[in-house]
Image (cartoon, rainbow, N blue to C red):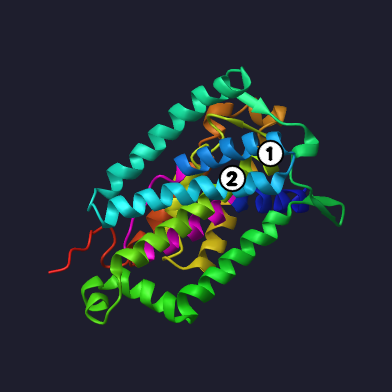
Amino acid sequence: MIVGLFVTTLISMVPLLLASVGEVVTERSGVVNIGLEGILLLGAFLAVMVDEATHQPVLGFLAGAGIGSVIGLVHGVISTKLKGNQIVNTIGVNMFALGVVGFGIYAVWGVWGAKTIPYDLKLPHITIAGYSLSPMIFVALGIAIFTWWWLFRTPFGRTLRAVGENPDAADVVGVNVDLVRIIATIYGATLAGIGGAYLSIDWFGGVTREIASGRGWLALANVAFSNWNPLMAIVGSMLFGFFDALVLWIGPMPEVNAIIPQELLRTVPYIATIIVISGVIKRVRPPKALGIPYSRE
């Protein structure tokens, strides 16, 4: 049972980790993107469409990455060039995604609520010690490690962090603040789109309007928990993934249902998130220029 719960935790971790690590990069540059929930949803929807049309799950993942990139580009340009409100922009993404996917499932497949795909259209898994594991578990961990190296061990990473801390100083030494922020926003949204594709064509084998189920918001909480560090985001994703897995693991048990209603049980990951974030929020330090549009004097 313990090993099974750990495997389910790894499975639950992937979309949280991808979205969290991407948002760490975005926020390190000074841009906020609270549209992760919507990007996960749109990535899941597009991935199913492309996977079903091509019978190539990898192309489905590329579709998820593609829609994430487009949203990241649009949000980045609006936030930098047009000085738009970053919160309002991305709330709009969440609302847009709910409407598009809710109607899109019917418009594309003629069914309401949910579209499932055959098992052979899901991303192939590998078997380790008798357990079926998605290769995306290892890809997500690799991306997190690479992103940490990119942010803290490369000249561009230092530039990106400088833009999020003091864009005026970065501008003085010749850094194109807007361009760096746009690149960071595209990177972050792309990873969220991949996370959405994972939900639909790897984990659940289909798409519904509720497939993201608050994971975008959990990812935002994980960014703060990790103190904007991709390696710590792995720890947070495992922690929040554990509570998600716990609900999936014990939810079907009759003895549990007799005591705790399903609706209440599903709130466990979010209650745990509130408790965890309440314990660390005073010790974290966000980038100083986070959410503040930059205008050259």
Q: Point out the residue furthest to the right here.
A: 130
Residue placed farthest to the left in the image? 297
Q: Marks 2 and 1: CB-CB under 8 Å?
A: yes
Q: Is residue 106 above or below residue 32?
A: above
Task: Please state the horizontal and vertical placement of residue 43, each as a whole percent of the image.
Answer: 55, 42
Q: Which residue is disc 1 drawn over?
A: 51
Res 206 → quadrant: top right
| Residue 147 locus on image (x, y percent) | 53, 69
Q: Tag 1: Cα neighbours inside 10 Å, few (<14), some, or many (≥20)? A: many
Is 62 left or right of 126, judged from the image as shown? left
The answer to whether 145 appears left or right of 182 in the picture is right
Chain-order first, disc 2 or disc 1: 1
Would you say residue 203 sits in the magenta stretch? Answer: no
Q: Secondary structure at mark 2?
A: helix
Magenta region: which residues? 15-37
Q: Which residue is mark 2?
A: 63
Which residue is painted at 46% across and 73% down in the image? Answer: 151
In the rendered image, the vertical position of residue 137 relative to residue 203, given as above or below: below
Give coordinates of residue 231: x percent, y percent: 54, 69
Q: CA distance from mark 2 to mark 1?
A: 9 Å
Q: Place residue 159 in its image quadrant.
A: bottom left
Image coords of residue 134 (percent x, y): 73, 52
Main SS, magenta residues: helix
